[in-house]
Amino acid sequence: MNMIKNEGIPVERKHVKLTSQNPIITTIYTADPSAHVWEDGKVYIYASHDMDPARGCDLMDRYHVYSSSDMVNWLDEGEILRSDDVAWGRPEGGFMWAPDCAYKNGTYYFYYPHPSGSNWNDTWKIGVATSQKPGSGFKDQGYISGLGGFALIDPCVLVDDDGRAYMYYGGGSRCEGGELNDDMMSINGEMREMEGLEDFHEAAWVFKRADLYYLTYADNLDGNNRMRYATSKHPLGPWTYRGIFLEPTGCSTTHGSVAEFKGQWYLFYHNQEISGQGNLRSMCIDYLYFNEDGTIQTVVQTKEGVKPVGDAPAPNTNQKTYSASRVDGGAVVETNEQGESVVNRLDIEGSYCEFQAINGEKGGRAAIHIRYATAERLAKLNLTVNGHDYSLLNALSTGSLLDYSGLASITVQLEPGDDNIIRLTGGNGEISVVSITVSPFLD
Ligand code: FUB
């Protein structure tokens, strides 16, 4: 039987973090973070999603957005766009690479590189999806016409203080920039090569500090790209090369963004700390400091991440906790030392547990938190919700199969009412699952 327990204390409150920790998101793989502070006073990260298991970067898809008001507690706003939503896109899907987002006149514009044909390398386009909200409701509007072809990747958009907007992109040693028209979906004039960059590879990011523009990018260091930067008094250069400010992270690619939040500057970047694989990456945040002359100090990569700025957001107290109502394929229900029902033997290939009669309330986004124990360094569970595949979720070690402090969290879509079914399929390490806590979003 499906048991519903009201635990009283919101599940996030039981897992208080003193620093953001790196990587900041551990349940799924996220890369290429583009961070922005929007008018609601929160910082948002628009990230690529490395799908697990990976096949090169071919299968990347299903962008997620993360928001925070204190830099430590990050809310998964959920998936905002997948290749299936892109009518003009590559028939085989995948290849949803490094995105960015811009805000102008009440609309959020989400820019993403995606091929329009099966011959992916020669058919890149920059797609644009829009929403009136920063973390949900995005609908594809087509791609920016007049651009296309080889290495049209990694778009980045800067909206300047005077309201004029500039787009940058590029890969394979050429970075281009140009001005966007007011519609934010067409180029005013022509894109042109950004002059003055040394050893440009990809991952352009432009930000402004006081009256100086900074263009940061990944270089070509073999198998271990670094981040370099250049500055200019003009948004489209020419640029003056300034140096390297992020040494190798241990990942073959590097890609980052720089943003100021509550008076402190940060670098958002990725590494492969969790997976050990260059195509299963994880976002990190560390402090970024400027010298008095405006040059950037080398960023120190840490495991702790950054400290909170301001109060932790109030957790969503609208939550219910469910025990598994069905197990099969070798999984068994047992009682743990705390007297809780737990699902064991999820290490068996084909084993699964199902949580039924999940209340999605009015339907839409809901955060789910899976509580577990595992002694494996990295166990995994395949998540499906109402038959919809969310692929593999990471369950990091809790140190022991008796320590049930593990929490794997992701935001999913639920149907209205109480007929939702969440299934966790095992076969990826020994793990013991206690419960799932479900928090439907209130908006
Ligand atoms: O994430 C796919 C590609 O890898 C990005 O477009 C590049 O910047 C690199 O991070």
Image (cartoon, rainbow, N blue to C red):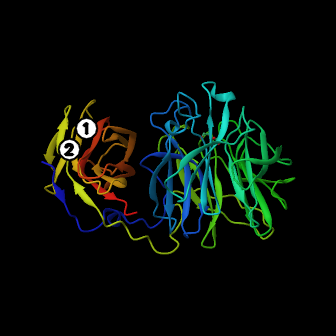
Does residue 316 appear in the picture of this structure?
yes
| Residue 86 % position (x, y) | 55, 38
Q: In this view, does 248 lie above or below 117?
A: below
- As drawn, the label of residue 227 is none
| Residue 355 % position (x, y) | 23, 46
Q: Is residue 10 above or below residue 351?
A: below
- As drawn, the label of residue 346 is 1
Q: Which residue is found at the position 76% from the left and 47% from the top?
A: 187
| Residue 183 % position (x, y) | 70, 53
Mark 2 vs 1: CB contact within 8 A: yes
Distance between the alpha carbons at the discs numbered 2 and 1: 7 Å
Q: Is residue 160 above or below residue 166?
A: below
Query: Exactly how many numbered labels are in the figure?
Result: 2
Q: Which residue is found at the position 53% from the left and 72% from the top?
A: 309
Q: Is mark 1 on a helix, strand or loop?
A: loop
Q: Is residue 311 above or below residue 102?
A: below
Quadrant position of ligand 1 = top right
Does residue 304 appear in the picture of this structure?
no
Q: Is mark 2 on a helix, strand or loop?
A: strand
Q: Quadrant of the C terminus?
A: bottom left
Front residue of 14/130: it is: 130
Residue type at mark 1 is Leu
Label 2: few (<14), some (14–19) or many (≥20) C-alpha neighbours in 10 Å: many
**Residue positioned most to the bottom:** 310
Residue type at mark 2 is Val
Q: In this view, does 116 lie to the left or right of 316?
A: right
Q: Which residue is found at the position 77% from the left and 38% from the top?
A: 173
Q: Which residue was labeled with disc 2?
A: 343
| Residue 148 % position (x, y) | 72, 35
